[in-house]
Amino acid sequence: MQRKYDFLVIGTGIAGMSYALKVAHQGSVAIISKDGIEESNTRYAQGGIASVMYPPDDYDQHVRDTLIAGDGLCNREVVEMVVGEAPSQIQTLMDWGVDFDRKEDGTYDLGREGGHTHYRVLHHKDNTGEEIQNKLVRKVRKHPNIDILERHFAVDLITQHHLGREVQKSHKDIECYGVYGFNLDTSEVITLLSKVTVVATGGIGNLYETTTNPEIATGDGIAMVYRAKGVIENMEFVQFHPTALYEPGVRPAFLMTEALRGYGALLRTTDGREFMENYDERGCLAPRDIVARAIDNEMKKRGDDFVYLDCTHLEADGLRQHFPNIYRKCLTLNIDITKDYIPVSPAAHYSCGGIQVDRDGCSSIHRLYAIGEASCTGLHGANRLASNSLMEAVVYADRAARHSLSRIPHLGFKEGIPDWDYSGTTYPEEMVMITQNFKEVHQIMSNYVGIVRSDLRLERARKRLEIIYEETEELYERSTLSQKLCELRNLINVGDLVIQMAQAMHESRGLHYTLDYPNKGKTSEF
Ligand code: FAD
Ligand code: SIN
């Protein structure tokens, strides 16, 4: 079966839905999600969205904080552009109904997180993402030009390769004509043809054993673009959030927002000692790479599985009022955050790398845009500043929307695209192999490609992943499609990219730290 849309958007997080709402007045839109429309990383965002709001804060200081966090690898022009455009794009979110907390005097109640020199994080209690997701879903559902395809899994981008032409990375003329979408309820694969396609598939957290990301974050978009021979970059910079609630075996790990530290919470070792001042003069509010590494080091030195986050000195009513979800969640574990220390440890959280795009969100493949966490814009460099990703998503959704609206009158649908080839395949009887390979990928990535790396660990990871890659490709070739098998395949592709790019780094910078090259190279700006 074939369906045709002017705009095809893969992903129903903040990036995909913002884009869809901005183009839908000018054509037909399909927005697809492999889960229900409500599920995404966006939904779980806690701290908020960064934006310069009031003096004494200004754009220069937000730009500077972003550059410092990015450890010399940000694209300064992109940083200036995004920081400058953020307030008006966030205003659009508010116009769509998103509600951010205000103080009694009517001004916004701004939070602060690691690496920010000012209070500049707009938030809705401690569940900002849920507020954004709900309001966008409501608006998307109401739009007459938007078709929502839930439980449709994007398997592969359609390019000239599907017309029988050889496609190579060096080719400058690769074009995207749509995507093969796997209906998870009927097991039918639909050929979704489009004039432009937008990858807004989010992050890669499920590469690792412990992650704050929900199950959907399996790097599908990045893997699809990689297989279609598009350019991917900066994948070595995987951000670990320093403070996920320590609950072994629980996926996703529940986040203890950095805004708690912005509110005054402190980190302590299990014997109650503060330690962050030994690592950085900014203490608990140093950028994330530094705090996560410090915690990792303290845990390894002491043989502990966690450190403590201490809120007990903070005023109890204010704490409960600002962080009601965290308060409630911890109570279910008999932790009263106003009285008890909270056990926390780092967890894979955010991918700074992704599909390389220009300032309009255009990827290296024609007619293909990438926005949100799946993309690499140059904003984050080697380490993302907290709460800059929701901001980046709305700015790039807008830029990509404006660019594609100007292109759409000149584009048509590609003729002659074949439907999905189901022949010669059998059901994957070996589900146990898939489950086991998932576990092995988690272990390999967590043990060898985590917060601290080395040449030996990376090479071991590469070799182990290669074996799993071959087994999985072989299984994929002879099996009918299944969501888990596709996700495993994608995670292996993405893990391989992280390892390859980490192996090419002969220095430590931002989120990439290796014992063999502990110092920063000479190109550093800061
Ligand atoms: P997502 O919101 O992840 O959406 C991806 C969408 O793509 C989903 O709908 C998914 O189902 C769909 N999808 C994926 N693969 C496929 C496929 N193969 N086929 C079809 N559909 C597919 N950032 C901040 O700026 N501030 C914060 O306070 C903050 N807090 C966070 C807290 C947590 C716990 C987490 C996990 C992240 C947080 N982040 C925060 C990061 C931020 O939430 C994400 O970077 C951002 O929401 C990503 O938005 P997105 O639209 O790019 O992707
Ligand atoms: C948090 O609330 O700590 C997460 C913020 C982010 O990832 O930007």
Image (cartoon, rainbow, N blue to C red):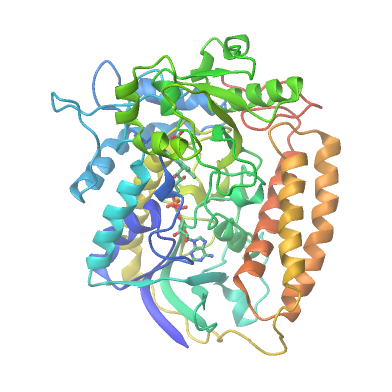
Is 22 on the left-hand or right-hand side of 424?
left
**Percent x, y of residue 373:** 49, 48
Is 175 on the left-hand or right-hand side of 237?
left
**Percent x, y of residue 217:** 55, 54
Is 456 on the left-hand or right-hand side of 231?
right
Q: Which quarter of the rendering shows the C terminus? A: top right
> From what the image shows, is residue 241 above or below residue 294?
below
Q: In this orientation, does residue 404 appear?
A: yes
* In front of the other: 234 or 277: 277
Q: Quadrant of ligand 2?
A: top left
> From what the image shows, is residue 33 above or below residue 136?
below
Q: Residue at x 35, y 50 (%)?
A: 399
Give the quarter of the image for residue 518: top right
**Percent x, y of residue 175:** 53, 68
Q: Residue at x 32, y 61 (%)?
A: 20
Q: Seen from this angle, which residue lies furthest left?
A: 105
Counting labels gives 0
> From what the image shows, is residue 456 above or below residue 93?
above
Give the quarter of the image for residue 523: top right
> From what the image shows, is residue 151 above or below residue 357?
below
Is 219 on the left-hand or right-hand side of 339?
right
Q: Residue at x 29, y 26 (%)?
A: 110
* In front of the other: 269 or 404: 269
**Percent x, y of residue 321:** 29, 30
Q: Residue at x 42, y 79 (%)?
A: 413
* In front of the other: 487 or 310: 310
Q: In this orientation, does residue 64 appear?
A: no
Q: Seen from this angle, which residue lies furthest front?
A: 334
